[in-house]
Image (tube, grey):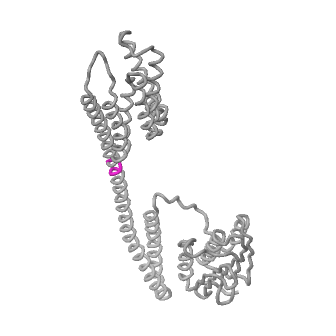
Amino acid sequence: MTGGPRQLLRRHPLASDALFAAALVLLEIVFVLLTPEEFRPGPLPAALGWSVLCAAPVALRRFAPWVAVAAAVATLALPALLDHGPATQSLAFVVLTYTMAAHRPVRPAALAAALLWTPVAAVNVVAPIENEFLSVSPAYLVLNNLLTAVVAYAVGRAVHARRATTEALRERARVAEQSQRSLAERAVADERRRIARELHDVVAHHVSVMGVLATGARRVLRRDPDAADEAIATIEDTSRATLREMRRLLDVLRTEAEPAAELAPQPGLAAIETLVEQVREAGLPVTLTVEGGPGPLEEGVALTVYRIVQEALTNALKHAGAATAVVRLSFGAAFLAVEVTDTGRGPVPGRDRIGHGLVGMRERVGLYGGTLRTGARPGGGYRVYARIPVEQLGAVPA
């Protein structure tokens, strides 16, 4: 599979660095084998062992970088013991310098380079390796090591800068894409609002026309039946047009994220008992009490009563804790009242947020000329109380 081994090594940096260290050891072995026996530093098994020891810090370069730096510096004692330095030792210093420069901020990277190469310069000045075939002055060794360190550090910093630039460009592209998406969504929303306003004006005009025609038809119904019939026919056509515009208006206001509304009746008073049972199953003991008998209620009013009970019980579930609740519906000749109380602690100011539910309840009750009171009870717990006049409901008192 294309890219499989690369992705595997990226997910396991310790394993990939261990393979890299093994590659350095293999390079050392090849170098020793290509060297004539009289020029070899010692037996092959011993050279292999020292090479592995010097390459070991490379395996830790990303897993434990500072430990790797300390281990590499510790291997500087080998030239004094062996009278030569394995090739993997020099390579390990170069790799660690590059790694710290490429993956660390500038100060830690510079500190690591100084910790690595300052002891190397000191060893070359104090105890340089003597070679009978090649005589090199300590100044040349120090200059050569300094140049190597500078090159490794510079390459690492260049890689670090390129990675930072690439990441910044990716972030900028992500922000630009998000901004573009937000602008597009805002443009769509603005267009939807504009269309909705226009359709609202059309619907309002049709409704006004139907009202005027209905008034005229009622006035001429006995005097001129034909004119009244023509006006009623016009009202019929206008109502159909109004329904079509209303459907278009709802289609415009419905966003793509909203699921399509199910073709089911809205809940009313009969659904409150089922709601109370669901809340009991959720863990809040609820008692439902009904006082009086409801007369014929508009569907909107019945839905308002249901939503008040639903929101109040939902808040009780979230905020009341171990408590009980009581739902009381009172139907009188001039009003209906809804009261939901619980014995819990209620929402804690500054920590629990009820959200927009209470605002929605207040708007629903105010639409029918009622009042809503919410707050903590004197004896503890929380209370939601709504009172709606019957005369504004279109209900017939019992």
Q: Position of residue 193 (x, y in %)?
A: 38, 68
Above or below, 212 against 1 in this view is: below
| Magenta-highlighted residues | 169-173
Q: Which of the 4 image quarters holds residue 81? A: top left
Say whether residue 269 is left or right of residue 224.
Answer: right
**172 or 120, which is in the foreground?**
120
Residue drawn at 41 percent across, 79 percent down: 209
Q: Main secondary structure of the magenta part?
A: helix
Which residue is rendered at x = 45% and y = 62% of the image? 251
**Closer to us: 168 or 250:** 168
Q: Nearer the viewer, residue 137 or 286?
A: 137
Q: Is residue 98 visible?
A: no
* Nearest to the observer: residue 307 or residue 213: 307
Residue at (32%, 30%) from the top-left corner?
124
Quarter of the picture holding the C terminus: bottom right
Residue 383 visible in image:
yes
x, y percent for residue 246: 46, 68
Residue reaching furthest to the front: 126
> Magenta segment: does it hold 372?
no
Let me know if residue 172 is in the magenta part: yes
Taking 66 as reference, is 290 left or right?
A: right
Q: Position of residue 67 (x, y in %)?
A: 46, 39
